[in-house]
Amino acid sequence: MRAAGKAAVLFSCLLFLTSCAGPKPVLYPNAHLQSVGKDTADQDIESCRQLAESSGAEKGTGKGGRVAKSTAIGAGVGAASGAVGGAIVGSAGTGSLVGAASGAVWGFLMGLFTTGSSQPNQAYTNFVNRCLQEQGYEVTGWQ
């Protein structure tokens, strides 16, 4: 595998891992949490998340979504500018590929290091919080 292919695979893996990461509720260690344990609490959080989504509450993008969006935009801008530059020197296809790769890396890094809300949308968090509260958990916040 050429170096460019290896870099593309590594970049795709990083993007996938980053997009999966997202804020989740932090539970206060009350009597209910202590009696059911962390594994059961994690299952309850996941079922509340699924219930929220099936009820129409949108999770929102969070940081992972912001990174993915920034990467896609960077790749598109890079491909377009690379194609223009490549057309000028006689190799639009190669210029487009180089531009897309460099634009994606730029977009990925910008998404990682720019500040912005990484919290899910408020209706979603309110729904999950209430679902967990009705089961006996106390949500102290999201991170």
Image (cartoon, rainbow, N blue to C red):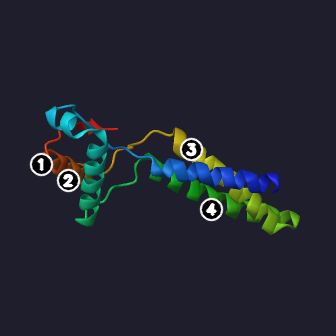
- Which badge, 4 or 1, comes first in the chain's sequence? 4
> What is the secondary structure assignment of the residue under circle 1?
helix
Give the crowd class for mark 1: few <14, some 14-19, many >=20 residues within 10 Å.
few
**Res 48 quadrant in image:** bottom left
**Res 92 quadrant in image:** bottom right
Give the distance between the C-alpha atoms of the residues marked 3 and 4, in whole angstroms: 15 Å
Q: Residue at x 45, y 46 (%)?
A: 21
Q: Please, is residue 133 above or below residue 83 in the view?
A: above
- Which badge, 3 or 1, comes first in the chain's sequence? 3
Residue 113 % position (x, y): 53, 38
- Mark 2: amino acid: Phe
Task: Tell me the residue that label 2 is attached to.
Answer: 127
- Mark 4: amino acid: Gly
Task: Tell me the residue that label 3 is attached to.
Answer: 110
Q: Please, is residue 49 above or below residue 140 in the view?
A: below
Q: In the image, which is nearer the foreground, mark 2 or mark 3?
A: 2
Task: Tell me the residue that label 4 is attached to.
Answer: 76
- Whether residue 132 sits left or right of residue 82 in the image: it is left
Q: Residue at x 20, y 53 (%)?
A: 127
